[in-house]
Amino acid sequence: MSDIRNNWTREEISEIYNSPILDLIYKAATVHREHNDPQEVQVCTLLSVKTGGCPEDCAYCPQAARYHTDVKVHKLLPTQEVLGKALEAKEAGSTRFCMGAAWREVRDNKDFDRVLDMVKGVSSMGMEVCCTLGMLTEEQAKKLKDAGLYAYNHNLDTSEEHYDEIISTRTYDDRLDTLEHVRNAEISVCSGGIIGMGEGHDDRIGMLLTLVNLPEHPESVPVNALVPVDGTPLEDQPRVSVWEMIRMIATARIIMPKAMVRLSAGRVRMNMEEQALCFLAGANSIFAGDKLLTTPNPEVVEDKEMFQVLNLKPREAYKGAAAVKFEQIPSPIGN
């Protein structure tokens, strides 16, 4: 059984990351089976509850107010509309519902009070409820916990060395402080990053090094491939290859054996075979629905077909509530 460690060196992670790709997939698949059911994949849904108008300058993000993109700004959605979307997601097979707001940080105001109501409502449905709202204080984290929040997403995005090339409106330490506040409030930590932003392989290794050597591993590690958006500084970045995604997923799986490794943004560009390799390499979560905040995502019906072909089953919520099963559809290869 693989040890759970928080004292990895850059050299150790680099050796894993740079190993021959088939060896890397085999090792990751082996570790994955030691700690997880390889047939289980959690289905999550991500909803933008407040879109656009963000004061930050994250170079990848179409929601930054300073960039000219096609994103339409909308204020915080009505609570009942959000709860309706959550119920739809549950009925479609999701066991985790994530709500994202384009804020720099959480403010103690009526909008935050409404988010707390949304959290209470989604939690009462028996789903894991997750939020990504920007920076927050420990007191705000405790309020979210009391409302029933299961997880909080706050990505590192990239390595500390490359960070200033992507964002100038908050520091790397700001991100680490928020993760500490989340952990201290006994909320599950969701933190990963994005590849394809002009970083080098050493930067990808550096980001994983920071995550794995946190006092506790994040329970959830999203691995995103940049989806370039016209109007953002990274609009001309080339597509990340599936092999680069696999290297990240496999390395994350080996060094953080029990984490949920989430195959996140960029999945829309992958065919079923490429996604299957990601699952083999240790990914055990996807986001369902036609959008990830503001970027495209595969259709739910495509995912249901993929689950049928690959004999995957949706993972139940950690809360113990029964998962809503994907409806059975005919398999094109007769599985």
Image (tube, helix red, strand yellow):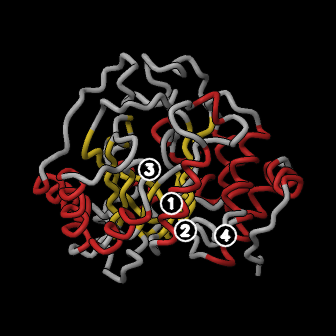
In front of the other: 267 or 274:
267
Does the residue at mark 2 contact the one at mark 1 (Cβ under 8 Å)? yes
Q: What residue is shown with label 2?
A: 219
Residue 6 screen position, x and y as percent: 75, 69
Identify the residue shown where x is 65% and y is 53%: 249
Label 3, label 2: how far apart the Cα atoms are: 19 Å
- Which one is closest to the eye, mark 1 or mark 4? 4
Q: Quadrant of the N terminus?
A: bottom right
Number of residues whose C-alpha sits closer than 10 Å to that of mark 1, classed few (under 14), some (14–19) or many (20 or more):
many
Residue 229 pos. (x, y %) = 44, 23
- Neighbourhood count class around disc 2 (C-alpha, 10 Å): few under 14, some 14–19, many 20 upward: some
Q: Nearer the viewer, mark 2 or mark 4?
A: 4
Q: CA distance from mark 1 to mark 4?
A: 14 Å
Mark 4 highlights which residue? 215
Which dot, 3 or 2, sits closer to the camera? 3
Of residue 91 and residue 335, the one placed in the foreground of this image is: 91
Check disc 1 and report the residue beneath it: 190
Q: Is residue 250 visible?
A: no
Mark pair 2, 4: CA separation: 12 Å
- The residue at the point 37 percent across, 43 percent down is 292
Amino acid found under the numbered disc labelled 2: Glu
- What residue is at 34 percent from the left and 56 percent from the top? 98
The amino acid type of the residue labelled 3 equals Met
Can you identify the residue that label 3 sits on? 135
Q: Secondary structure at mark 3?
A: loop
